[in-house]
Image (cartoon, helix red, strand yellow):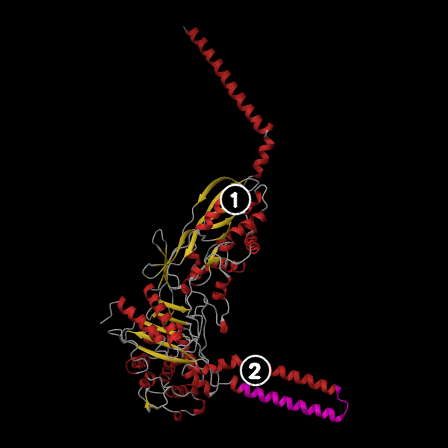
Amino acid sequence: MEEKERSSLKVKLFLLGIAIFLVFSVLVSRLWNLQIAKGSEYVAEAKGNTFRYVSIPAPRGDIVDDKGRIFVTSLPQFAITLDWLDLQSAKGMDPKQVVKTLAGYIQHYWGNGKESVDMVAEDIMAKVQMHQFQRYEPVVLMENIPLQLRAVLAEHQQELPGISVEPRPFRYYPMQTVAGHILGYVREVTSSELKGFQDRAVQAGLSSDTYESGDLVGQMGVENSYDLYLRGQDGVQLMEVDNQARPVDRLTRQDPVVGKTVQLTIDADLQKTVSDALDSVIANLQKNEGQAKAGEGSAVLIDVKTGKVLAMVSRPAMNPNDLTGNIPDDVYQRYFGSQPGGTPGVAWDRAFQSVYAPGSTFKMITAMAALQDGKVGPFETIYDGPSSLSHPKSSVGDWNAASFGRVNLFMGLGESINYYFEALGERVMAANPERLAQVAREFGLGRVSGIDIPGESSGTAPSATWKLQLNGPRLEKARDQQLEQAQQKYNDMMAKATTASQRQAAQNWYAQEKAKIMFNFNQNYKYGAEWQWYDTYNTSIGQGDNKYSALQLANYVATIVNGGHHMKPYLVDKVTDPNTGKVVLQNNPSELNQVDISPQNLDYVKQAMRQVVTAGTGVGVFKDIPGFTGGAKTGTAQLGSRGTTGAEEYNGVFVAFTPYDNPQIAFAAVVGYGIHGNSSGGQVAAAAFKEYYQEHGMMK
């Protein structure tokens, strides 16, 4: 029995050995085939395969108003892309001819639709050239392409290797012109911009590689200043491609992360109300007031306690949707080119980039300086006439030919009496010719506020030192050049002189020329560089070289009525993660400085502003707001000096606050060629305040 079992085991072991031998033989044969017979072929193929990372664009984050209503979002739209490597590897196809064929199909959708096929093809090649170091990534040629064009390209796909129509995130501004300047727009980063964005990333503690050529970035407004939050994180697809740049396999993939949500301080309802009211005022000026030049304007509404900007409007209106995709030449010129009369294009934000003479809205500065320096008392009266001034010929007369007699601060501001404020300015500036500018800057006039979008203008708060520094060196340089030229001419005359009389004539000419040059210089220097009485008078009533933005004027009024706290204005309340709701950035109120004006003097000026709307030049502006309380100041800012065309043209300027007790909001508007502040900017203020009262249940 045991012998039989041993025999059976031997047979099994023998058969197992044969099986193992056969399996091993097959493996050896296959290994020989792979490594020896066809080894060189596979090595060659493997060496040709490479791995490439292809970026997957992340949708930018939303921008919403203070209540979460969408101002900006990203929608899936279709874009035409060109994969240059795929195009080059297409057999029997000339890449340039393919580009020209594509240009023929998209010609009518490219730019203004009037470019030739050859020009469109050149534009496409220029886009490809911009991405020459990233040719393994598709180049976006057109965004937001219409359905008809998608159908055409699909029909002719065989003629267009490397050309694809792909869904991509597309920036969309559903409210169109409402808040367009605040929001900004998005374009592909240019080579000149790239370094600046990379530096911003490094300053934020990120890698400079955060930004690369071809990235979409914000070009102005919130889209620009909060770009690092909005842009999200691009995804990445690891691709294996062969030596012909053709995809072999899609390997690992990291999905894109949508950008953060940026919530503004702007109230969409207030923003639209102010926008509509400003449009209405401008249209009325053009149609009924004979002001053909009217068309520009700006208005700002601000929270007096925090500096939050609740509405900020600039006209002409900007629609960021106009600046997505390919921009036609005429649209580009309208937005960014110089306009008739030398005015900037539509994209220029008149609310904080343009600066204007404030007119009589500046008079509160003159009043506060005089009160604080003890140059006048609030109830002290001054005669409304040129006799109150030491240099009446240099003064600016009143709008009302009839004198109001003796007036105090309250009537002076209420009726906007020039002689009263010129007299105050004379008293203040005689003691300190820097004083009005000092007080103005304390209230934010003539200095940047630091608002959280780029491009703010500082404006000008003029003073004796400012005028001297601005014009003195220029006049001295001109004098020195004229003297040098006269010296050279004299030297030439003396070199050519052959007689004593000729030399004497040259000497006489030179003496007379130098005297003439110095006389003209002294005159120009006296009036052009040295502070004069007319400078004091003009500055005191908001004319002359005073230049401020609507944003500065609104914040200046806010500072008067909030107790002298000059707050930093801001547009973004917070930034949140849309997936978790977590707040990643919270902007808080920030005080820039406390003004050096006593609470009592601030209150006197506040009372005087109330008289403007109860018994002065602003009576009736807020008549349609039941229960309205507050104050204001009207302004009619002359656009030119005496004897010029601009002397008869005026901007309308208006500032206001409400309610009177415990003020909450302040307003400023500048309306180009608006003539009177109460009938132009005042109408915008009335619409804004009425909307605010309705929203907050303040109607009585």
* Res 370 → quadrant: bottom left
Where is residue 329 shown, x and y percent of the image?
51, 62
Crowd band around label 2 with a 10 angstrom C-alpha radius: few (<14), some (14–19), many (20+): some
Characterize the magenta stretch by its predominant secondary structure: helix
Disc 1 crowd, CA 10 A, few/some/many (<14, 14-19, 20+): some
Give the amino acid type for the residue marked by disc 1 in the picture. Arg
Above/below status of 303 relative to 77: below
Q: Is residue 307 in sight in this rendering?
A: no
| Residue 101 drawn in magenta | no
On the image, numbered disc 2 is attached to which residue? 475
- Quarter of the figure that contains the C terminus: bottom left
Disc 2 to disc 1, how far (Cα)?
63 Å
**Where is mark 1, residue-wise?**
52
Q: Secondary structure at mark 2?
A: helix
Q: How many marks?
A: 2
Local secondary structure at mark 1:
strand
Precedes in sequence: disc 2 or disc 1: 1
Image position of 13 with respect to 201: above or below: above
The residues colored magenta run 496-525
Front in this rendered view, residue 527 or 377: 527
Q: Is residue 212 above or below residue 179?
A: above
- Spot the residue most to the right: 498
Between 199 and 256, the one lying in front of the other is 256
